[in-house]
Amino acid sequence: VIAAAGVATAVPSILTAGSATGAAEHKASVRAESPTLSGPPSDDLVAHIRDLGTGEIGLYTGEQEVVFHDQELAARLFNASR
Amino acid sequence: LSSHREAPEISKDQVADSADLYAFISPDNPSTVTIIANYVPLQLPDGGPNFYEFGDDVLYAINVDNTGDGTANISYHFRFTNKITNSKTFLYNTGPITDLNDSTWVRRQYVTVTRIENGKTQTLGTNLPCPPCNIGPLSTPNYASLAAAAIHPLPGGGQVFAGQRADGFYVDLGAIFDLGDLRPFEQDHATFGLTNTGLGAMAAGVNSTAGSNVHSIAIQIPISQLAKSGTAPTNASSPSSVIGVWTTASRQKARVLQASKGTNVESGPWVQVSRLGNPLVNEVIVPMATKDYWNAQSPSGDSQFAPAVLNPELAQLLPVLYPGVFPNLNAYNSAAPKRSDLLAIFLTGIPSGVVAGFQNSMSTTEADMLRLNVAIPPTTSNPSNLGLIGKDAAGFPNGRRVFDDVVTIELRALAGATIPLVDPKFTPDAAASTVTDGLTSGPSDLTADGTESYLPSFPYLGLPHSGFAAAG
């Protein structure tokens, strides 16, 4: 499953769309597992849901790749594509 | 071909397809090494109005290993940008292009060159103009001067050129891939029992690349900037006098097509999609099922491909295709051969003690790189297009010059001509020293059909064939 072209703005809104507690957990999870984005600024962000079961998502921006795990976000994106 | 369209995936991606790689001591400037990486192969010179160019979404690299571990100590990166100067026309040019700033030139390309060494990046040139394609006598009336203006000096010495050139590689592709029917030897071919094929008489080879163009990235670099020691080596017997060279092309991991905008989104890390060190390795040594995988790998991992080098399919086929012509090779093949001669030529370099007075090996690491002993001077008098097997140590597989007949050299090596280097008991078949695809008149012939335009100075490959001249 590949989510792109608009996911850049959708990801933050999804992260903050759930309960306050849940959203905080997602953010913490992302911060804990992902390196900080750096490099040339880019308006484009491509998300690749690699594994719905583990919630593994790859984010491509600029010349970087960030991998994180968020089962709920992966499920939401997948459901949004159906 | 050498590496033109050599793997299934890259054959669908012409701008990222590495076709040939050359590395040699510059004959007219022997304190420098010239490296040429050809891309965008098999161009029809008249292929307008969207004439050929490098990919502005491709990262091209020339990599140099000077320690022998199969990883790059130095890399030169080349990125291209395009500019359209007139949004109202469908034409590549609206009048004669007389210089690189001519307002009539609509679709232009620029190259930015960076050098990466030990994690440090140095920009050598930014947005250096590339020449236009050679369209014809009205559009590019003085093409030689346009091309010359696109040769740019580099800080610290050396020069760079990126643009269209005549393809200097020569091969009888039609014969080789019609089940190995080498025209000079077709009277000996088994023909698979087919009759009335129209074959059966000796004939000269046909150069499949004659008249076609490529896009070349050519860079000339002081030896001292490439050698491990930081100075120009003088001891040809020292492993530290050897460098290994290969070229790669990479694309970003994600691509999203945006039909409404007419532009695409490329994002993420670079993923290697093309690789070339020694000519013909991925083409005729690596099995088709693993060619795409090979293209994505680093030379440092090439031990995984060593079995295909040690017992190459083509060496097994020659005695079958030409019954009775290669009896000694056939017998050698039957004894579970381990072609350590080919392993040295392609993967480790030739160590000292194998060829008298010669070596081009840094280590025993199996890595497909074009190895060049930079302490061996260029051969300026009577060079042999057969390189080392022609007793010319300045030629392939000691690097590769533009005129080296790498197809014949490798055919003869595969046929067993180089086995005695590692197994003196073996006697090569007589045909092993004569087999060829028939495109030169002999070892001293440096002008195979379609390649007569080699230049004596940088960038050495000839001016591209004109589109107007090619039409019709």
Image (spheres, coloured by chain):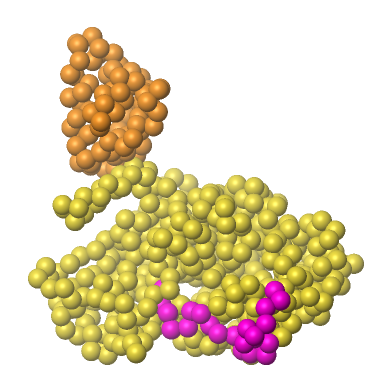
Q: Position of residue B318 (x, y in %)?
A: 73, 71
Between residue B275 and residue B91, name the one nearer to us. Answer: B91
Work out whether B192 lies above or below B289.
Answer: below
What is the magenta range?
B192-214
Judge from the rendering whether residue B150 lies leftward or rightward of residue B243; answer left or right: left
Work out whether A9 lies above or below B278.
Answer: above
Q: Quadrant of residue B352?
A: bottom right
Q: Main secondary structure of the magenta part?
A: loop
Q: Quadrant of residue A42?
A: top left
Q: Residue at x 31, y 47 (%)?
A: B255
Instruction: Please say whether residue B17 is visible from this viewpoint.
Output: yes
Q: Quadrant of residue B412?
A: bottom right
Work out whether B220 lies above or below A68.
Answer: below
Question: What is the quadrant of the N terminus of chain A in the image?
Answer: top left
Instruction: Please say whether residue B374 is visible from this viewpoint.
Output: no
Q: Residue at x 30, y 44 (%)?
A: B267
Q: Residue at x 34, y 39 (%)?
A: A64
Does the stretch in magenta take in A73? no
Q: Who's yellow, chain-wise? A: B
Between residue B198 and residue B153, name the one nearer to us. Answer: B198
Question: What is the quadrant of the C terminus of chain A in the image?
Answer: top left
Does the stretch in magenta take in B208? yes
Q: Position of residue B85 (x, y in %)?
A: 14, 69
